[in-house]
Amino acid sequence: MNIDRLEEMRVFPTFNKVDNVGLPVQSFESLSFENVSFNYPDKDEVVLRELSFDLNQGERLLILGATGAGKSTVANLILGLLPTEKGRILFNGYDIHTLQIKSLRDVVAYVPQEPSLFSGSIKENVMLANLSAADDEYRVALDTAQLSPEIAAFPDKDATKVGHRGLDVSGGQKQRITIARALIKKPKLLILDDITASLDAENEEKLWQAINEHYPNTAAIVISHRLSTLRYVDSVLFLDAEGRGHKGSHDELVFSNQEYHDFLHEHFEEVRYEV
């Protein structure tokens, strides 16, 4: 991370610059977007337009939409990395602006499209999110992220050094290390932003089976371009070309929303949905 990037992060607007201000968050019960609109200062077009949807404890939500539709923006708004301009975001029924942002992020785990690793070992990178995690919790996180077999093949196992920004591991391994780092927090809400680069269809199925087994009450928001992900979620939030949201089951949206139907045909080679 260079000096320019650090300066960009320092001056970026945030609604709460003091970590310990606001109501503490200890769990995840519900999330509600109420007519939320957002656009970036350097762009004229609105990214999200009057977006409303609900997510409850244990629910799994898939966000779909074209490139630039605002999928990652939704994740950044939940984390408080972007300030809401219009509308409200409620976390457990409280306006997100009234909450202690650090404690909110303690119950949420986020795996971005471009995950970052730090100089050190694989284990140090995973444990960074929960330094007090027990050894069995660490192993469960590795197993769930489908990383254990590859680590076992490394000469130095999980003591293998990953190098600065993860340059000594593959892109897929880098992302799965970050997934394990997120899971070791035992989050109440897990946000996965396009993890298809690190997992093939078979390993994605194993990932969700392990999440259901070891993290059964964890809600999830998944941003994905893989149609098979529909098998592992309860509902879909489709962001259309105008930045408006449409939530429902896959079957409901296919038959009621022509833009969603057309989007699937345009962006996926295989549009059949098999339960």
Image (cartoon, rainbow, N blue to C red):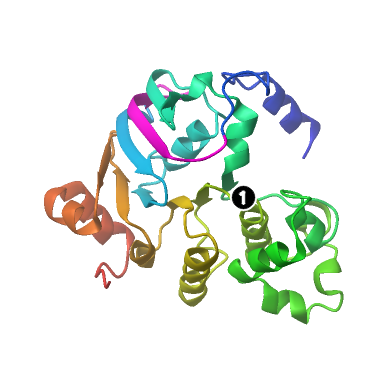
In the displayed structure image, the side of residue 143 where residue 33 appears, left or right: left
In the displayed structure image, the side of residue 81 where residue 212 appears, left or right: left
Q: Residue at x 57, y 36 (%)?
A: 26
Q: In the rendered image, which quarter contains the N terminus?
A: top right
In the displayed structure image, the side of residue 241 where residue 32 appears, left or right: right
157 over 194 or under it: above or below? below
153 or 56: which is nearer to us? 56
Quarter of the view holding residue 140: bottom right
Q: Is residue 243 visible?
A: no
112 over 210 or under it: above or below? above
Residues shaded magenta = 26-44
Let me know if residue 141 is in the magenta part: no
Q: Residue at x 50, y 63 (%)?
A: 196
> Residue 122: horizontal and vertical position, in percent?
78, 62
Q: Residue at x 42, y 52 (%)?
A: 58
Q: Residues within 10 Å of mark 1 (few under 14, many from 20)?
A: few
> Residue 118: horizontal and vertical position, in percent?
79, 50
98 over 209 or under it: above or below? above
Q: Amino acid at mark 1?
A: Glu
Q: Residue at x 36, y 25 (%)?
A: 36
138 over 164 or under it: above or below? below
> Residue 219: horizontal and vertical position, in percent?
45, 50
Specify the farthest residue to the left.
255
Let me know if residue 38 is in the magenta part: yes
Q: In the rendered image, which quarter contains the C terminus?
A: bottom left
In the displayed structure image, the side of residue 12 where residue 37 appears, left or right: left
Q: Is residue 74 visible?
A: yes
Across the whole image, how many numbered discs are drawn on residues? 1
> Residue 216: horizontal and vertical position, in percent?
48, 60
Quarter of the view holding residue 157: bottom right
Q: Secondary structure at mark 1?
A: loop
> Residue beneath label 1, please?
114
